[in-house]
Amino acid sequence: MIHTRIHLTILLLGMSLCFLSSCKDNDDVLNINDSQLTFTYEGGRHTIIVESNDDWSIYGLPEWLSASRISGINTQEVTLTALRNSTGLDREQTLSIRSNNSSNIRTIRVKQYANSEGQVFSVDDTSLKYFNGSTSHFETQDSIILKSSVRWNITGPSWLSMRFKEQLSDMNGEIREGSGTIYLTCSKTYEGKEARKGTITIQTEYGDASIQIPVEQMGLYDVKCVNKHILSDGFWSYTRSGCDTEYIMSGLYEGIVSPEEFSTRQWSNPTSKTGGIIYSELKPETYYTIFTRAMPSQTTVFMEKLNAEVIRTASEVNQPRASITDVQQGADGKWHFKIVMNEQAKGYYYTSAPYTHYHKIQYAVALYNNIGTKNVGFGQTDKTVSPSYTSGTLVTWAVDENGKLSNVVDIYKFGDSGSSSVPVWQKQTGTAHEDIFSAGMANFKIPSSIN
């Protein structure tokens, strides 16, 4: 009897200890007093309280956001400080606060606006922009799409000029107004061996919001692939080069390889310094390395300076596509195309232009006119389209279920009566692709009223 009582006592004690241990796990506390924070474009501070009976850490801080502490024990205050947002774009980040001795996690969604409340002031792209070392033909080499509801000014390096609403000028800080495309042109030749760098600053009239865009002009023998665009079975890239470059050699190697591994036997034929580099019939979802090298105008020897860049081709199955197939020419000489979506595409936009020679200005104007007059078709099922002219170009962009444009563009050239229709990237130099994207089509969001 006594033994039975002892065993029972031990059992109850064990159950009590187990219960207390379990309660301790369940009683781990981790709470925060605010799970959503917003900052103005000017930046600022917000203080949160982390309530805990354990030690904890903060994860996911971006470069523009700092914390007074990134870890602590028990309940502590944490001050989050945001830098001024000069990107021209709203930005968001989700932070996580985790207990170090349990699975407890709390998240904080942080958002910082680009502009004052109710004010529109943004650009389509703030990435680094490259320019030739030469000023030949004063060609437009890049552009910025600005949306602004307030007056603004723009400043930048003396070697760049701009065109806005058909007016060519320096970036002299003059007050301007309205939205539109700012075309950028290199206005001074540069003969330095190393690239020179600068910054374009666009800001509101009273300086309460500003946007910075880095720019770079090529050194004497530099070569750079810019505006790289993934096509249906390959890619196309425009080139920027130094002022003494007469020709560019390019080569392609499957995989990510170093210059030491690259074989000179894989160079393609020289191309002009203002041309494009284009490759087709590549493997899907595969990394390729592009090598380029410049040849000066006064020699037949290519410079030793080698440029290497890596691209990844499109997926055949995970990328929304609206492919152009079943190309036929009717008895009347007009062309008929079938646009076929893959499973990832939930719709597509298409437009055409009556140009096959791809003069830069004419082609860009044709596309702009199509946009301006809403002459852009939309479809959500496979269909046959028939442009009203006998020669020209047909372009399609697929969209996903969220309406986002695909990273892959399909472009077809169709010729005069009797000529064959071929994918433009198998026959042309690539200028057509540059025209499309320099015209703002890469980031163009087609209004829903077109649907």
Image: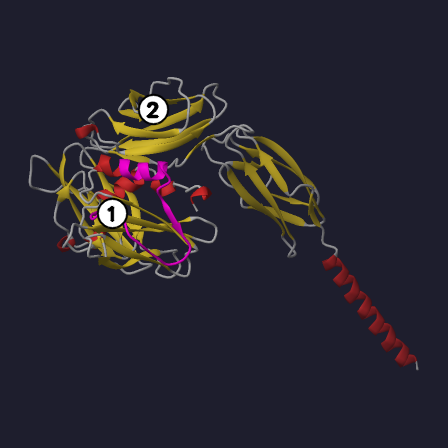
The residue sitting at 20% across, 47% down in the picture is: 391
Closer to us: 180 or 451? 451
- What segment carries the magenta color? 365-392
Q: Mark 2 falls on what kind of element?
A: loop
Sequence-earlier tag: 1 or 2: 2
Residue most toward the front?
332
* Residue 68 seen in render: no
Residue most toward the bottom?
1
Dot 2 alpha-carbon crowd within 10 angstroms: few under 14, some 14 to 19, many 20 or more: many
Drawn side of residue 437 relative to residue 177, left or right: left
Q: Is 138 included in the stretch rendered in magenta?
A: no
Residue 386, position in %: x, y?
A: 28, 52
Closer to us: 179 or 280? 179
Q: CA distance from mark 1 to mark 2?
A: 36 Å
Q: Amino acid at mark 2?
A: Gly
Please state which of the two labelled residues, at mark 1 or mark 2, is closer to the viewer.
1
Q: Mark 1 falls on what kind of element?
A: strand
Give the labeled residue for mark 2: 156
Residue 212, position in %: x, y?
A: 40, 29
**In the picture shown, does residue 187 fall above or below 1?**
above
Dot 1 alpha-carbon crowd within 10 angstroms: few under 14, some 14 to 19, many 20 or more: many
Drawn side of residue 203 relative to residue 3, left or right: left
**In the picture shown, does residue 269 fall above or below 340?**
above
* Residue 24 seen in render: yes
The residue sitting at 64% across, 57% down in the picture is: 103
Q: Is 382 included in the stretch rendered in magenta?
A: yes
Give the labeled residue for mark 1: 393
